[in-house]
Image (cartoon, rainbow, N blue to C red):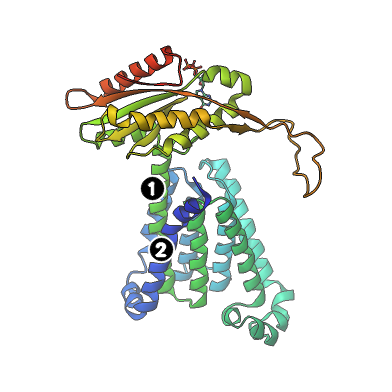
């Protein structure tokens, strides 16, 4: 997939949720806050449920994030239950810092050893932030205070709410979160980055109802993102990024009769793997999947398994789709794929400089065979799939790189 659509796809939902939340708070401030006054218990069950769901789906970063929001909320809502020596601003900044590290973390299983290690890491980062903010050098020096004249003139907006060290830490955490979100655009990263924006907004106009509102929003978004991620994992093929076999089964169940089903298989893929290695074989599968995914005429591509792919054309009979399938076959056969050679230099030569070592980039070609069958009232999905497989076998027998109808 192209970078920009991926970035938009992965950031849209959290950004929309944040904008809606922010608009509600800005427009209906009194009502919302009043409505939340007697519901300050709500974040407890919501964050608890979100943490539980995240742990069940093995998305540990959200598990930790929800528990940390829960700790933050409890320490402010019920200080007698969870006494702590820090100001709300420091606590919020501690959570922001830990979140910026969680973005870089990978989801790990919640085994006891991982739990202990990650908890120690989180506690270490939080302690470091608290130490920096409360260190005598910074607290005693008036230059770093909100009231510092130079700072207030230079950054008036920030100076209203943050001391200079607080503002610098926020900037550092944001820069790190943004780098991760842009380098590797994923829903999981953008939700954590957006939760950091929420935390800044809270620390600007701190109040318990506002914190409760943000905690509820975070819990709801977490459950949504965890479920979306799990859905994606179940229905997307990990290697190629196109829809998986499970998605094929769901998709065909939702279709009426009368659709064409195409089985496609890479020719001589075993010898290709033997010659160029498994990694290059994987590159080929990705390339083939991308080509098949561009199918027109309302077709949808799936990875059936191994080097086999399936295309489904709702409402079309084989005669209507044969030209499209043949065009796909042709485009794959024509595609010159550049493979990475092991003797590539590690660094790119600078502009105008000759490469020290000859870069032997090699292009390879693969072909595919296709079998098309028709699914109607009289034929079950399984038999239509078998017929398409039979037609594929005929295509292989006929010399490969060809399309056959059952
Ligand atoms: N690189 C890579 N290879 C895979 C993957 N899945 C299956 N394969 C390989 O695909 C090859 C399939 O080989 P065969 O079923 O014998 O068929 P073929 O060599 O393509 O021959 P024909 O289909 O008769 O043209 C096997 O060597 C598998 O190891 C994968 O995910 N990545």
**Location of residue 218 with respect to 150 vertically, above or below:** above
How many residues crowd around disc 1 within 10 Å: few (fewer than 14), some, or many (20 or more)?
A: some
Q: Position of residue 188 (x, y in %)?
A: 48, 52
Check disc 2 and report the residue beneath it.
16
Query: Which residue is under mark 1?
Result: 227
Determine the secondary structure under disc 1: helix
Q: Residue furthest top?
A: 397
Does residue 11 lie above or below 257 as drawn? below
Residue 47 seen anywhere in this rendered image of the structure: no
Q: Horizontally, is 193 left or right of 318 in the view? A: right
Kindly tell me whether residue 110 is visible in this rendering: yes
Q: State left or right for residue 180 relative to residue 143.
A: left
How far across and down, in percent of the image, does residue 135 sit?
Answer: 70, 71
Residue visible at 62% across and 68% down? 171
Which is nearer the eye, 324 or 217? 324
Distance from disc 1 to disc 2, alpha carbons, whole Å, reads 18 Å
């Amino acid at each position: 997939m192209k970078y920009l659509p991926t970035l938009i796809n992965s950031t849209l939902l959290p950004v929309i949720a944040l904008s809606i939340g922010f608009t509600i708070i800005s427009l209906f401030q009194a009502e919302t806050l009043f409505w939340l006054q007697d519901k300050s218990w709500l974040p407890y069950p919501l964050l608890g449920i979100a943490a539980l769901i995240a742990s069940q789906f093995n998305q540990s970063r959200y598990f930790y994030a929800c528990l940390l929001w829960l700790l933050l909320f409890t320490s402010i809502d019920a200080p007698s239950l969870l006494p702590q020596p820090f100001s709300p601003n420091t606590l919020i900044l501690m959570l922001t810092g830990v979140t910026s590290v969680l973005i870089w973390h990978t989801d790990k299983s919640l085994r006891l050893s991982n739990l202990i290690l990650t908890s120690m890491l989180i506690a270490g980062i939080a302690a470091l932030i608290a130490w920096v903010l409360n260190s005598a050098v910074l607290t005693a020096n008036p230059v770093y205070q909100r009231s510092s004249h130079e700072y207030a003139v230079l950054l008036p907006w920030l100076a209203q709410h943050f001391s200079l060290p607080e503002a610098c830490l926020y900037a550092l955490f944001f820069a790190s979160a943004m780098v991760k979100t842009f380098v590797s655009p994923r829903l999981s990263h953008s939700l954590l980055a957006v939760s950091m924006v929420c935390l800044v907004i809270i620390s600007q106009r701190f109040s318990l109802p506002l914190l409760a509102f943000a905690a509820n929003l975070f819990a709801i978004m977490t459950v949504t993102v965890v479920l979306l991620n799990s859905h994606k994992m179940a229905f997307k093929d990990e290697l190629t990024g196109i829809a998986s076999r499970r998605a094929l089964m769901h998709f065909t169940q939702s279709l009426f009769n009368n659709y064409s089903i195409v089985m496609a298989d890479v020719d001589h893929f075993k010898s290709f793997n033997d010659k160029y290695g498994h990694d290059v074989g994987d590159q080929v599968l990705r390339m083939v999947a991308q080509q098949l995914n561009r199918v027109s005429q309302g077709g949808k591509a799936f990875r059936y398994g191994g080097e086999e792919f399936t295309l489904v054309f709702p409402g079309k009979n084989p005669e209507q789709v044969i030209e499209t399938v043949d065009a796909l076959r042709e485009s794959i056969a024509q595609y010159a794929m550049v493979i990475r050679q092991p003797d590539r230099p590690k660094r790119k030569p600078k502009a105008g400089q000759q490469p020290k070592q000859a870069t032997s980039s090699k292009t390879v070609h693969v072909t595919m065979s296709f079998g098309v069958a028709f699914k109607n009232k009289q034929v079950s999905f399984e038999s239509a799939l078998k017929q398409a497989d039979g037609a594929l076998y005929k295509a292989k027998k006929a010399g490969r790189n060809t399309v056959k109808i059952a």
